[in-house]
Image (tube, helix red, strand yellow):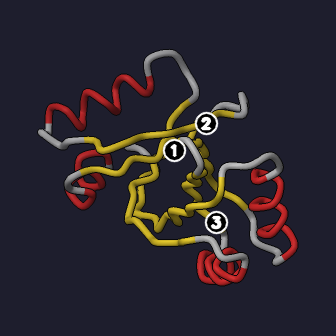
Amino acid sequence: MHNVRLETELHVITPNEPGILGRVLGTLANKGVNLKALCAYSEKDKGTFLLITSDNKKAEKALKTLGYKVKTNEVVAVEIDDRIGAGAEIGALLGNAYIDIDYCYGTSAGIGKALLVFKTDNNKKAVETLG
């Protein structure tokens, strides 16, 4: 069994400009909010951040104060062994259960575990399938 849970992710829209990563993450740090997961990318003139934090309410308030648009998404977070093929196994389980993945991101620090975050068309079923 995997360590799998529903999480609330902050979807933050910012300007796309130099220093925006430091500004967003610095804002969280200054409010004492720890970052648990991060995906960030830019498209033309906007930046997009997908964040799971230790205190989403505090993070959302701080980021909105800077004028950034913030909404929330329910996502599935699954902690897996950091080994070759572990992510493929998760993908196969979700596919075999006919769960469509809207997006996924993940990371490993090379210390034996990795974290994958999924937004799916049926997060409850994804948790049941992976749990």
Q: Amino acid at mark 1?
A: Glu
Judge by depth and name the residue closer to the eye, 113 or 65.
Answer: 65
Residue 64 quadrant: bottom right
Residue shown at the point (46%, 47%) measured from the top left = 117
| Crowd band around label 3 with a 10 angstrom C-alpha radius: few (<14), some (14–19), many (20+) | many
Q: How many marks?
A: 3
Judge by depth and name the residue closer to the eye, 39 or 66.
Answer: 66
| Crowd band around label 1 with a 10 angstrom C-alpha radius: few (<14), some (14–19), many (20+) | some
In terms of secondary structure, where does tag 1 sit? strand
Q: Amino acid at mark 2?
A: Thr
* Relative vertical location of residue 72 with respect to residue 57 in this rendering, above or below: above
Position of residue 28 measured from the top left corner of the image (x, y, whole percent):
77, 69
Position of residue 86 measured from the top left corner of the image (x, y, whole percent):
44, 25
Q: Which residue is mark 2?
A: 107
In terms of secondary structure, where does tag 3 sit? strand
Q: Which residue is mark 3?
A: 53
Q: Which residue is mark 1?
A: 79
Position of residue 19 measured from the top left corner of the image (x, y, whole percent):
83, 50
| Crowd band around label 2 with a 10 angstrom C-alpha radius: few (<14), some (14–19), many (20+) | some
Q: CA distance from mark 1 to mark 3?
A: 16 Å
Residue shown at the point (35%, 51%) measured from the top left = 119
